[in-house]
Image (cartoon, rainbow, N blue to C red):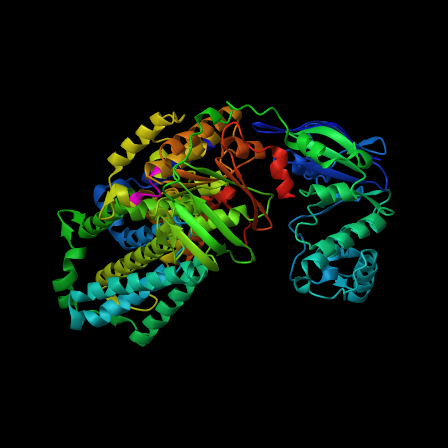
Amino acid sequence: MTMQRIKPHLPWITLLVLTAVVGVVDPNFLRPANLLSLAGDIVPLFIMALGLTFAIYIGGIDLSVQSMANMITVIASIYLASLGAWVAVLCIAAGFGLGMLSGFLTTRLFVPSFISTLAVGGICFSVAQWLSGNRALNMDAEQRNATFGWMIGHTGIIPNELFLGAALLAICLFIERRTILGRVLKAVGAGEPAAKASGINVGRYKMLAFAISGALAAMAGLLFSVKLSGGAPTIANGFLLPSIVAVLIGGTPLTGGVGGVLNTLIGTLIVAVIRASMLYLGIEATQQQMLFGLVLIAAIALTIDRSKLRTVK
Amino acid sequence: MYQLSSVDKKFPGVHALKSIDFHIKRGEIVGLVGENGAGKSTLMKVIYGAYQPDGGQILIDGKPVHFANPRQAMKRGIGMVFQEQSLIPNLTVMENIFLGYEAQFTRLGVVNWKAMAAAAKKQLAKVKLDIDPATVTSVLSFAQRQLVELAKVLTLEERVEGDLVILLDEPTSVLSGEEVKLLFKLVRELTSRASFIFVSHRMDEVMELSDRIYVMKDGQVMDVVAKVDADASAIQHKMVGRHVDREYYREQRQKPYDTSRTLFDMRDVVLPGRPHKLNLALHPGEVLCLVGTEGSGREAILRTIYGMLAPVSGRFEMKGQELRRFNPRRSVAMGVGYVPRERKIEGIVAGMNVYENMTLSQLGRYSRAGVIDVGREKALARDWIRKLSIKAHSEFADCGNLSGGNQQKVVLSKWRSGGSDIMLLDHPTRGLDIGAKEDVYDMIRDMSDDGVGIVLVADTLEEAIGLSHTIVVLKDGEIRQRFECRPGAKPSLYDLLHHMI
């Protein structure tokens, strides 16, 4: 009973405790400038996790987000020269469409989302390799600054990425709390049979959840390529595990129905602190994924609602 | 030989078995009858070890025993032939027969298939089934699978010392008349090997096969009847007969319905997998009750009206408009509301609050351009919480934490607030306590007063008789009889049972 009551508050308690611990070990960590730059760096991951939240909120998963971002870095780098700012539309439309494809496979052909999104992710990865000729590509620095420079500059001491992240969070929060889409997604996550029995076209809304996930993964990829001024088919590798961790540790369980995008904000900040702490603890970059794997296992074990599972395969 | 002595079983809120005394002699066939919810399946689960009794004793040859699980019960010779068949379809017959007991045929983990096939052949001979033990189970007919299942249970004969007790749960529900005769003949012959407990809805079958019949109602054994004294109507009376209070079902509030208009009209409608033509109509203010045993086709009719099942042929008009495409969205838009039997799964969304549940079927009405007007939702919820006196601390209460009766009220207000005037109620009082049931009966009368047509599948026959204007008796997917149920001139239980079985 007490555990039941504490559970919803665990994410932000974890965040505070972790921040305090790292702050004690290295007081520099708590300087506003350091915190702001850490937050700015995590924004691409946050945007990806934001989209992923919708897929997990309905009890599904989207494993294509990392490959999607990879592909988008390549597309953005190639077509920036010819399309200018319109490349952003192309990227987001590609993400939305491919997400829709995952949703179609899942809701109409009954392919479980973990495998349909894995397959779509495979397609994305291959497209990225093919388009790039398996090389790293560079954007023209001047053109990048002219079209997308506003994304990565600073306003005062605040990195502009933060405004972008905040705006997207606000939109997602609005969708989740105030729209039919958000309400239906909650019903699907918490009790799909009852939603169906209420006469709702559940499939259409589920497809939209995957489409949003794809579109936001594309935005994450776009921002990432702008930051790095280039793209490559493997440049965003290492995003998948932390983004899943961010969603789950924030309090949206794999079984869906509870949590939401605000939880993902906290989850992403936890990931950011864990990442920063690894620097202080002297953990090499190559070892980071090991830790994230362990954190993911712990997060799943803690958050999953076992009463919703009949059998696990 | 096998005996239960004042066995009790309680679940939260339900006293499922009340001091049951039961015994079975060697080679005897004992019948077990009772309505839905009478406690038959709980009793069977206690017998084969799936439930542990809270009080009383299980005795074998006079010695108390305790089963922690079905496997322990099997070790003492108690086997179960399941209603929904428990064979795994993609395994062969012999693999199914010896599932979990392959060790006797293995050496170093490798199965000697020849030995297993020979042993399986021996078991199949007991039930007179001449098939290759290496046949994949899915190609067998239902009747053959039933026999394989029986053969599987009969392997206990070699494995355990002492006597066998075999439970047959509705073994005839999927068999043809001819197959039932063969099965009964076989069971009689097998009494030399085992005792049988036979559970069925079909009174005639129970009376034909059993040496003694236990009649259950409300978790109690009402009577034990020997075959020679068995009289169908007397048993049926004990099964269902409790004091029927006209007030209880709000009969005084039953008013004539409006015959001038028709809400839906099914003409010669044929449903998939059933050969019979159905003719049904519903009028404003009418309570139309579908009566029949489990599997008689009541659910299929509800599902068709709700658009989850499309008829094969015939004409289905709803409010003067012929339906050609069937899906729940369309039915909901035409004013159909559905109160499902599985309240906790299909009725409410646990984890969502009262107002979120109430508007789930009518989000379009509480939104503009996809944006929900939460203020109006809350006002609606507060309104209906007051109207139906729903016991929830506020409109923010999680519906998963409400009591069964209050959950049902939320489901009803979901449809009523949306203006549904064709209500499908599937076991609306299942699992509710008496007070909550009476609330539901009142709501049914309120809806009739408002001109809502109701199609009801009731929990008990008395409920059906008490509430309805019209009763339609179904058997094997066919409409057998119609009854007009004017207050004071209602058909009796016997009238209905007569056509049901």
Q: Is residue B304 visible?
A: yes
Magenta residues (range): B358-363
Q: In x, y percent, where is residue B276?
A: 55, 55
Quadrant where the image shows the C terminus of chain A: bottom right
In the picture, measured across the screen, residue B341 lies left or right of residue A169, that is: right
Q: Verify whether residue A242 appears in magenta.
A: no
Residue B36 visible from this viewpoint = no
Which quadrant of the structure image shows residue A32?
top left
Q: Quadrant of residue B393?
A: top left
Q: Where residue A304 sits: x, y (%)?
A: 47, 44
Magenta highlight: main SS = loop
User: Residue A261 placed where, x, y %?
Assistant: 31, 45
List x then y, in percent, for residue A58. Answer: 39, 49
Q: Nearer the viewer, residue B450 or B394?
A: B450
Residue A285 falls left or right of residue B55: left
Q: Is residue A51 left or right of residue B71?
A: left
Residue B292 placement, left or right of A279: right
Residue A103, placed above or below residue B399: below
Note whether B114 is above or below B475 in the view shown. Answer: below
* Front residue of this view, candidates B63 and B280: B280
Q: Nearer the viewer, residue B199 or A283?
A: B199
The residue at 41%/61% (across/down) is A108
Q: Which residue is found at the position 27% from the left and 43% from the top?
A: B365
Q: Nearest the camera: B109 or A42?
A: B109
How many marks the image carries: the answer is 0
